[in-house]
């Protein structure tokens, strides 16, 4: 038996703000410059820091000479491993909520160099320009040691990690006899794929401003996806009382995962502020944004065996990724392949290779954005070999239950994504033969792919304060990295109490607010939204109780479930003339404000017995110049199944942004490492390419109906990651359809297509 | 950034006088120089601001050509009616480069003097003979997707990043310079130089030399010309290979040809033999391919950029085909 959780108050008022395309509540602040980011806060006497980055990839510092830097008037101090204060001893004190197994990197810890661009000194000066100049005068001598940064050259030294990071399970044990089943299959595909290392490259570079107050307390404005995660980190590392520090991140200029862990600029700014007892700002330069956290380079093999009717007989997916020497960053990559298609003989293998690099870091749809495209290209190759429509092949092997666990899905409307997406795109008109469509010199290709991401939920708390004026303030220490958290939480709260969204304020990005986990993995609507709903339900109960006690109350004796909240009123469901305004209830009962706090947990029993996932179907048209190999994406249709969509406007923006990044993954993004130097060389926006407007065509986003009463009280799954997952594969498949050239190495730059066209 | 002196030049002569001292640099639009100073790649001791000198006009010349002021903005040049009508390949080339914001700031003279975009030139922790003579070339044996296939040396395989200069090379422009020794004219082909054993020197300008204008001859190949730029994304990227092509046609036969390539060498690349190979030939892909092979006969690739040789051949054929068919729309 599957436990169906009882869901109190599931969308009591269908005409409320949930599901409406509400404009961003913070939009005005953002476009008028009134939204302030971490590097924009200041106090008089603010000092400025600039980080010195290592010139080598591995070895040790034999000498640091700071005399020339310190001799400049206005230079205050230079911090190095030689003069840093004693800090926390144990690794656990340096851990954060997203730390994988291992020993976290400690800036300025000792003379050892572990990776290129490692921060090795911090110059503090009276101005940014001076600090930057002085940083160049810090003379450092190194004793270089041999380094390894080349995954391909070192893949033989890989090992199988365990459950080394939250949110990721090791691959399931093999099922059936995949090797034999593959050999016995009449139709086979066996391909190798590579994914280049990618950097997050948010527009806003990582920055921290520590404001040092007269009473010795610190307000830390940090670029982070978890104010409380950073709060715990700095208190642990610097041995500070929790009450002495407050971390704020009300606005974040993009993060994509890069703000999930405390980054070294936070450490550096804290170090300087606590030692100098001054306010300090440290902001990374664009090249220094390549000094931490990236989507790891990956080499994969996918082998598929099928019967001639397309039935999958064997599925083998192996992946090897890079991690650092000191931590086991895992994103598992292969697990979705065992979940996406019904197949009895499956082997999923995932290994890591240690390189002399900084630890990789979750980047939009970590693991899935790398692994699913490999599977989805292999499926396209199989469809070509079978002479079968790629969409038909996917429907033929549709997984009704999760093959990895045998559990049902809480909901899965992937079929609807296929149907509606194909219809919108015009897939039925596709001629399956490669090179069958052209216009002038351009070959036209249509490709598709499916996508999947987990619908996770954590624990969070929220606080609500309803004033006698009918205005509601709800808060939780989550983040809005441009995703729309402010707006959707406002909608959920407004919906809960039947208030117009204008009467509701949502506060986030402040470590002093009720507990919320780091904001990532598409779990914030589920996690924090559930807490917001829960706390509003409590306020609601209080109002009903107060209303029932008023003299001559039209609501006297009416049960809570028979009362609607709408237009700022409590209304009897069956007799709408019987109503009281919220403000009348509060005034009448002499209540100045109602304060509640609530914590929401996932439905653990339901979660143990179901698989929770979002799904997508992506359809892409590419145009490839037959002579020059230049590729452009001409059209994208992305059909998404993600439960209830709280705000179709912000959700559409999420998917569109993810598709843009999918175009980047597919065609452009790649960090070039010079393995002799162990250093990424294209460390700026000019040479590390992300899509520009001219690369982005019309992106048509569809949300299919998906009812899910197990995922959470809102029925919403979150849309932050799912938009990117299928896109690179759909592009690769479209390029094959256009040209007959199969490229399995991302990004697909024109030279790779030309090599096939020759 | 490092401290530097700043002086605003009152006249061209004043500018030349001030810039003769060592360590001085002219600044106009500043779109490249200031970035390089912030990155500590260039360390001038002083800047002479020439941006207010009256060198920003675009004027007719006596011989029927056009004089582009050194301080005329790239955008104003690209959108000038006379440029668009008489030298469409030049307008196309400018608009293929940078971004609208940069083109609004950048001057024509500055465009000629922009530095390479080689990764190693920009990263002061790595060797680069152009930035620090004698330190070695990081790109040889390193990351070299965007590097030269023609005219490189064992000291440097960087490429010149300009689009505008590729068209100027094809058009046989002349750079007018005033300097400590007076005024002189430098044919465009002699303005930029190959790296050889002195890759730190990009041009034949002498200390104190000020570019005052770029003169276009009357012949603009307006009927049959184009600028083709191939890059890794649709906009805001430097050329992997670019081609400025101009043809004078006699029916279906080529009477005169101009062909300049960008993204392949330390300077805009022209090859008289390749152009000669086109003269008198029918305007067909075969003739164009034959000329391309002449031009690329000594091309040499590195680990990541060998594809450019094949790509350049294809680009030349395409550009000449478009020029012959007059696909290069005069107005963007």
Image (spheres, coloured by chain):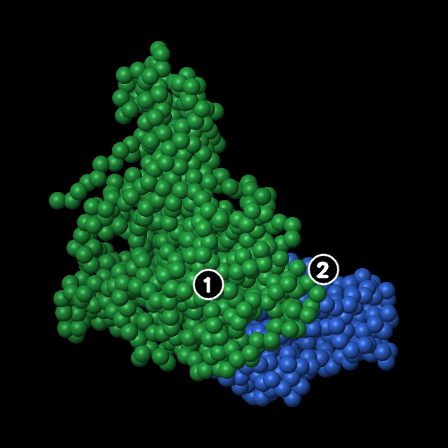
Query: Tag 1, which secondary structure?
Result: loop
| Quadrant location, the N terminus of chain A | top left
Q: Nearer the viewer, residue B223 or A533?
A: A533
Residue at image location 28% in from the left, 68% down from the top: A161
Q: x%, y% of residue A626?
A: 45, 70
Residue at image location 40% in from the left, 28% down from the top: A594
Q: x%, y% of residue A182?
A: 18, 71
Q: x%, y% of residue A740?
A: 36, 70
State which chain is coloured blue. Answer: B
Q: Nearer the viewer, residue A678 or B296?
A: A678
| Residue B43 image-quadrant placement | bottom right
| Residue A499 image-quadrant placement | top left
Q: Nearer the viewer, residue B313 or A326?
A: A326
Camera-side mark, 1 or 2 = 1
Q: x%, y% of residue A396?
A: 20, 57
The verdict on a common chain for dots 1 and 2 is no
| Quadrant location, the C terminus of chain A | bottom left
Q: Is residue A714 left or right of residue A266?
A: left
Q: Chain of mark 2?
A: B
**Quick one: label 1, few (<14), some, or many (20+) residues within 10 Å?**
some
Q: Is residue B190 above or below residue A357?
A: below
Residue at image location 46% in from the left, 54% down from the top: A240
The residue at which mark 1 appears reads as: A87
The residue at which mark 2 appears reads as: B76
Residue at image location 67% in from the left, 66% down from the top: B1
State which chain is coloured green. Answer: A
- Rounded to the nearest angstrom, the CA distance separating label 1 from label 2 is 58 Å
Q: Residue furthest top?
A: A552
């Amino acid at each position: 038996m599957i436990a169906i959780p009882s869901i109190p108050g599931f969308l009591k008022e269908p005409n409320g703000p949930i599901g409406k395309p509400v404009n961003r509540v913070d939009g005005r602040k953002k476009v008028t410059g009134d939204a302030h980011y971490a590097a924009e806060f200041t106090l008089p006497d603010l000092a400025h820091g600039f980080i010195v980055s290592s010139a080598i990839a591995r070895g040790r510092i034999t000498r640091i000479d700071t005399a020339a830097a310190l001799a400049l008037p206005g230079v205050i101090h230079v911090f190095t491993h030689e003069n840093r204060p004693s800090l926390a001893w144990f690794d656990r004190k340096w851990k954060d909520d997203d730390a994988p197994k291992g020993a976290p990197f400690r800036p300025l810890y000792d003379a050892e160099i572990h990776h290129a661009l490692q921060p090795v000194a911090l110059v503090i000066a009276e101005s940014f320009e001076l600090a930057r100049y002085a940083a160049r005068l810090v003379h450092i001598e190194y004793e270089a040691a041999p380094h390894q940064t080349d995954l391909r050259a070192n893949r033989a030294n890989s090992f199988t990690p365990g459950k080394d990071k939250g949110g990721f399970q090791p691959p399931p044990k093999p099922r059936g006899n995949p090797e034999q089943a593959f050999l016995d299959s009449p139709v086979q595909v066996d391909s190798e794929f590579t994914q280049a290392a990618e950097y997050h490259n948010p527009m806003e570079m990582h920055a921290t401003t520590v404001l040092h107050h007269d009473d010795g307390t610190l307000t830390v404005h940090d670029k982070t996806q978890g104010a409380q995660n950073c709060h715990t980190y700095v208190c642990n590392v610097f041995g500070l009382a929790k009450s002495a520090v407050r971390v704020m991140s009300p606005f974040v200029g993009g993060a994509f995962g890069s703000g999930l862990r405390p980054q070294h600029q936070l450490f550096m700014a804290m170090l300087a502020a606590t030692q100098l007892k001054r306010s300090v700002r440290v902001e990374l330069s664009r090249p220094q944004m390549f000094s931490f956290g990236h989507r790891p380079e990956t080499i994969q093999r996918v082998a598929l065996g099928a019967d001639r009717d397309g039935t999958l007989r064997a599925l083998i997916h192996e992946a090897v990724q890079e991690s650092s020497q000191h931590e086991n960053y895992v994103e598992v990559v292969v697990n979705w392949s065992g979940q996406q298609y019904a197949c009895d003989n499956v082997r999923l293998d995932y290994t890591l290779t240690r390189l002399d690099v900084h630890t990789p870091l979750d980047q939009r749809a970590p693991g899935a954005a790398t692994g699913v495209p490999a599977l989805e290209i292999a499926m396209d190759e199989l469809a070509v070999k079978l002479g079968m429509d790629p969409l038909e092949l996917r429907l033929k092997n549709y997984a009704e239950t999760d093959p990895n666990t045998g559990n049902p899905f809480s909901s899965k409307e992937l079929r609807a994504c296929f149907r509606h997406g194909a219809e919108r795109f015009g897939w039925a008109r596709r001629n399956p033969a490669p090179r069958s469509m052209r216009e002038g010199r351009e070959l036209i290709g249509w490709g598709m792919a499916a996508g999947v991401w987990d619908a996770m939920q954590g624990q969070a708390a929220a606080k609500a304060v309803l004033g006698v004026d009918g205005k509601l303030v709800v808060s939780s220490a989550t983040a809005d990295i441009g995703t729309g958290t402010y707006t959707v939480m406002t909608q959920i709260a407004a919906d809960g109490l039947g208030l117009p969204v204008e009467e509701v304020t949502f506060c986030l990005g402040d470590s002093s607010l009720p507990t919320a986990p780091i904001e990532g993995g598409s779990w914030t609507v589920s996690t924090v939204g559930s807490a917001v709903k829960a706390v509003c339900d409590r306020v609601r109960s209080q109002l009903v109780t107060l209303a029932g006690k008023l003299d001559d109350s039209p609501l006297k004796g009416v049960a809570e479930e028979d009362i609607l909240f709408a237009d700022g009123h409590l209304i009897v469901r069956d007799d709408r003339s019987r109503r009281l305004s919220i403000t009348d209830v509060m005034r009448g009962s002499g209540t100045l404000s109602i304060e509640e706090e609530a914590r929401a947990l996932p439905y653990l029993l339901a979660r143990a017995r179901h698989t929770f996932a979002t799904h997508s179907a992506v359809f892409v048209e590419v145009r490839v110049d037959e002579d020059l190999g230049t590729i452009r994406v001409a059209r994208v249709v992305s059909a998404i199944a993600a439960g209830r969509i709280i705000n179709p406007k912000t959700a559409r923006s999420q998917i569109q942004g993810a598709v843009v990044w999918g175009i980047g993954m597919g065609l452009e993004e790649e960090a070039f490492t010079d393995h002799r130097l162990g250093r990424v060389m294209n460390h700026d926006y000019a040479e590390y390419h992300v899509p520009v407007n001219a690369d982005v065509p019309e992106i048509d986003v569809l949300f299919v109906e998906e009812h899910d009463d197990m995922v959470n009280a809102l029925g919403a799954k979150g849309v932050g990651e799912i938009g990117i997952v299928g896109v690179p594969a759909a592009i690769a498949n479209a390029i094959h359809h256009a040209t007959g050239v199969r490229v399995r190495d991302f990004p697909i730059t024109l030279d790779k297509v030309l090599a096939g066209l020759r | 950034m490092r401290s530097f002196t700043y002086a605003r030049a009152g006249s061209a002569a004043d500018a030349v006088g001030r810039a003769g001292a060592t360590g001085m640099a002219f600044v106009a639009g500043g779109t490249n120089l200031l970035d390089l100073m912030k990155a500590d790649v260039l360390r001038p001791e002083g800047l002479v601001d020439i941006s207010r000198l009256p060198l920003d006009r675009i004027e007719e010349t006596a011989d029927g050509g056009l004089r582009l002021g050194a301080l005329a903005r790239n955008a104003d040049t690209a959108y000038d009616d006379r440029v668009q009508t008489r030298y469409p390949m030049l307008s196309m080339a400018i608009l293929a480069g940078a971004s609208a914001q940069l083109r609004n700031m950048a001057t024509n003279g500055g465009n000629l003097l922009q530095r390479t975009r080689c990764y190693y030139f920009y990263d002061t922790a790595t060797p680069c003979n152009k930035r620090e003579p004698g330190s070695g070339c990081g790109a040889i044996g390193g990351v070299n997707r965007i590097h030269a296939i023609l005219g490189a040396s064992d000291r440097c395989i960087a490429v010149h990043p300009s689009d505008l200069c590729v068209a100027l090379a094809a058009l046989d422009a002349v750079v007018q310079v005033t300097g400590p020794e007076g005024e002189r004219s430098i044919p465009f082909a002699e303005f930029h130089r190959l790296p050889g054993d002195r890759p730190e020197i990009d041009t034949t300008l002498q200390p104190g030399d000020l570019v005052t204008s770029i003169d276009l001859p009357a012949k603009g190949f307006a009927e049959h010309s184009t600028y083709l730029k191939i890059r890794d994304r649709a906009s805001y990227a430097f050329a992997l290979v670019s081609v400025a092509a101009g043809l004078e046609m006699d029916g279906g036969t080529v009477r005169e040809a101009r062909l300049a390539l960008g993204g392949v060498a330390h300077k805009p690349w022209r090859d008289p033999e390749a152009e000669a190979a086109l003269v008198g030939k029918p305007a067909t892909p075969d003739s164009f391919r034959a000329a391309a092979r002449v031009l690329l006969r000594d091309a040499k690739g590195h680990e990541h950029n060998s594809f450019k040789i094949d790509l350049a051949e294809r680009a030349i054929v395409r550009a000449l085909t478009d020029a012959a068919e007059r696909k290069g729309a005069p107005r963007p």
